[in-house]
Image (tube, rainbow, N blue to C red):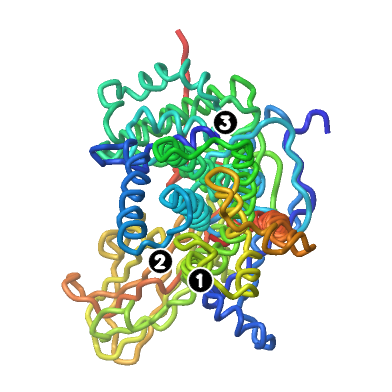
Amino acid sequence: MLAELVRTDFKLRYQGSVLGYAWSLLRPLLLFAILYVVFVQFLRLGEGVPHFPVYLLLGIVIWNFFHEMTVQSLTSIVGRGDLIRKIRIPRWIIIVSSSISALINLMLNMLVVIFFMAVSGVELMNTSLLLLPILIEVYIFALGLSLLLSAAYVKYRDVNYIWEVILQAGFYITPILYPLSLITNITLQKLIMLNPMAQTIQAARYSSVTHETITGYQIFDGGWYLYIPYIIVAVTFISGLFYFKTQAKFFAENI
Amino acid sequence: MSDLAIKVEDVSKTFRLPYEKNTSVKSAFINVFRTHKKGYQTQKALSSISLEIKKGDFFGIVGRNGSGKSTLLKLLAGIYTPTRGQVHVRGSLTPFIELGVGFNPELTGRENVFLNGALLGFNRKEMQSMYQEVVEFAELERFMDQKLKNYSSGMQVRLAFSIAIRAKSDILLIDEVLAVGDAAFQSKCFEYFRVLKQQGKTVVFVSHDRGAIENFCDRCILIDDGSIVASGAVNTVLKRYNEITLEHIALATSKNTDESKNRWGNQSVEITTAHTYKDGKKLNKYGPYDWIELVMVVKANKKVIAPIYGVTMSRQGESPVFVTNTKIEGVKTADLNINETARVSFKFENIFGNGVYVIAPAVANEDGTAFYDWREDLVKIHISGWGESYIAIHPKHQIKVTNG
């Protein structure tokens, strides 16, 4: 059932477009072109950061995954209301199916990232493998939020707009477009790095693009609050799961 | 429990109906501080339902609209969670609340078959092996690679139905919506029910259609206002169902007897009262072959010559079943002087089928060209007690069979 839902999602995504599935690859490619022209050629933001275009792209790709997954899942329960009200279907399958289609997109995007890594001569490091657990952390964080938001959306329809604003703000307070070194205030740097998204994006860059990335480890100098981002991820996931579970019983009547 | 398929123990379901749906965070926030005024009203959809359905039963649930029968079905299906009590289900279960759940107009017929099949619990392999049968049964071979949005609604239903009947669960929950559609489709549905019965599947069938219940169900329950009012053999439950339906019709119509609208005539003669009697006693409930006597009292407001007195009896809201008057029957009537009254009695045998009837008494001039007074719905009677509920009239008759 899960496989069939994911397949449907995917078929519908590029329904009616001439290039179809090719868009899954074309989108990150075009995005990369834009980033390269604007941030590398015009703004010259990343001077001093080796392989800045790839560095930028990796950040964007991870953020886009997080954005896409939470936004899609948020409306997924309400959007699939017909199924929930008419057949016996485990509610979590709907969230997982929308998360899997976001994951597939992430994989395709990562192919593009790897391609550009090879082109711009990024050296393969023995930390590169860490990328996988880092992406898993992002996935768990996004999944927890998806469960929380989608269940809340059934009851309160303006969760949608609130989340949009939060995402917008998150995009700017996370060092995605700019290197963290651009911020000179050290306290501010620390605050920014408490955000799991900042922590994961920086860690991903550190492990697979260049060691000249500031990570949480360096900033907090090994202090205990180094673990705060992980705690946030864990708490989000568990509370999301719990809230979803208690609310799921009433989805059919509340939608 | 070994031979039970479904066991429902003391289940209640209460819905919270918000006055104005609290779908924004702001109003939820405000309501936290306004605890004295509830933002919702609770509606008890079902209260203390207990029932047992045996394996292989074809079990019916009847009730009027809004009685809670669909809610019960959704509770059995696990779509709703009971507020109180428990539902135990043994074996795999497929609910058919609607045909073609999850059909997507943007996908082709083929893709929709696989999607819908998956939602019914088939894996891809099973679907592939039965795909050909599904398409053939739906008679849609030529259309399978077209998008569903280009199908006619009849084609969609056919496709959905031919997938649905493949379901091989032990227990099937079927809502009455399955049995809508044209006559050909209905007969297909009923054919399917027959097959299910032969296979010995457990079926729970919700309907307000007496005929379908009578034809297929072994046992049934009657739900009214959220509780079980009758259960057991189909005949007795349906009898009770008829009574309940009649009561509700009577209740609904007794409220709107607006005199002026239901009265015609120039009032030269006025009908002052009219009642029905049985053996001289005022009564409005009658059984088979009872003698019904309708008595009307009239008063003349001016002098009239040889008026015609008549009655029209109709099933509530329908065309007349019985009409008679003094002219048809050749009964001579005397002139009426001003302020003179007359008592007119009509007596007839009750051969009419169960239901609510209205009797309209009337007075007309001597040649029947103008009405003095016609009072629609003045008298209302209930007829019940006939064994076969759907037969309109029951004339006394004889049957003779001679062999050879």
User: Residue A240, can we see it?
Assistant: yes
Residue lying at the far right of the rendered structure? B1
* Element type at mark 1: helix
Q: Label 2: which residue?
A: B359
**What's the CA distance linking mark 1 and mark 2?**
65 Å
- Determine the chain carrying the residue at label 2: B
**Side of B106 where B238 appears, left or right:** right
Q: Does A111 sit above or below residue B363?
A: above
| Residue A1 image offset from top left, x and y in percent | 55, 34
Displayed quadrant of residue B335 = bottom left
**What's the CA distance linking mark 2 and mark 3?**
57 Å
| Residue B178 image offset from top left, x and y in percent | 46, 39
Indicate the amino acid at tag 3: Gly
- Determine the chain carrying the residue at label 1: A
Q: Does B5 sit above or below residue B300?
A: above
**What's the CA distance linking mark 3 and mark 1?**
37 Å
Q: Quadrant of the C terminus of chain B?
A: top left
Q: Quadrant of the N terminus of chain B?
A: top right
- Residue A107 disc label: none
Callouts 3 and 1 on one subunit? no
Indicate the amino acid at tag 1: Ile
Q: Residue at x 45, y 34 (%)?
A: A7
Q: Label 1: which residue?
A: A162
**Side of B119 where B235 appears, left or right:** right
Q: Label 3: which residue?
A: B121
